[in-house]
Image (spheres, rainbow, N blue to C red):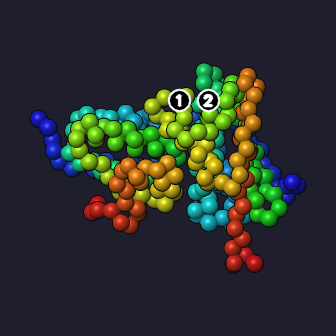
Amino acid sequence: MKATNMAEIEFLSRSTNEGFARSAAACFAAQLDPTLDELGDIKTAVSEAVTNAIVHGYPDRLGKVLLRLRVLPEQVLEVTVRDWGVGIPDVAQARVPMFTTGGSERSGMGFTIMESFTDTMRVRSIPGKGTTVTMRKRIAQRASAR
Amino acid sequence: MRETGRCVYRLSGEIDHHRAQQLTQELQTVLDTRLPGALELDFTAVSFMDSSGIALVLRARRGMEELGGTLRLTHLPRQAERVLRTAGIHRLVEMDQDGEGGER
């Protein structure tokens, strides 16, 4: 699908960038005039995807994370989070609720929340090469904007 | 000596993986030193929460189970409440939305 606007941000896999990434996504999404709830959904989904890249993509080194934001036709926001880390050997297993290879501070609910808070989610991963998560969310056209 | 009273622990700011370790340690200190009979996690000042908050709440629940006490989440902003509901936490822990809840 052809994008009408696009932004890309590349950052190091430091946990302090989790807040930066979700705020940047929210700022970009503002052009679609989302509700506070929709904005909250976007920030949450981005936070989960970026945290996965930082925690699981690069478990023992720093690496680069790419956040790509696109506006697609019909008020659809597309968020892509990509890393070049270790990859996920079994994506289906990783998407199972409560499954985690993280410690006690992780809940294993990241993918479940990304799926619930967006319209579509696609995960592509190659062990040793990295992981790409693409999520799309349609922002409702508000009556006042017509 | 076991303190049987109610303890209100006020969370604030953005609860994410970046802050998870610090928050978990702070919560554990509250559980270990106050030994509350009833713990209330007050979310009034929480501006954002992702799934890291689920792990934190489950840690609090486990701690209160060990102490034989109760856990309640109060003044939950909508965004944090949606995250917890998606994980089914409302079936495990008493939750009051923002505007409901007990006295401050």
- Closer-to-camera residue (A90/A49): A90
Tag 1: amino acid: Gly
In the rendered image, the vertical position of residue B97 relative to residue A91, given as above or below: below
**Badge 1: few (under 14), some or many (20 or more) residues near its Cα, within 10 Å?**
few
Q: Dividing the image into 4 quarters, which one contains the C terminus of chain A?
A: bottom right
Left or right, residue A60 beside residue B3: right
Tag 2: amino acid: His
Which element is circle 2 on? helix
Mark sitting on residue A111: none
**Badge 2: few (under 14), some or many (20 or more) residues near its Cα, within 10 Å?**
some
Residue A136 visible, this angle: yes
Left or right, residue B82 beside residue A80: left
- Identified at 59% across, 31% down, the residue is A55
**Residue annotated with mark 1:** A102
- Identified at 43% across, 49% down, the residue is B89
Residue found at the very far right of the displayed protein: A2
- Identified at 63% across, 49% down, the residue is A115
**Residue annotated with mark 2:** A56
Which element is circle 1 on? loop
Q: Dividing the image into 4 quarters, which one contains the N terminus of chain A?
A: bottom right
- Tell me if label 2 and label 1 are in contact, CB under 8 Å: yes
| Residue A70 screen position, x and y as percent | 78, 52
Residue found at the very far left of the displayed protein: B1
| Residue A17 screen position, x and y as percent | 61, 39
- Chain of the residue under the numbered disc 1 shown in the image: A
Q: CA distance from mark 2 to mark 1?
A: 8 Å
- Identified at 66% across, 64% down, the residue is A34
- Chain of the residue under the numbered disc 2 shown in the image: A
Residue A17 visible, this angle: no
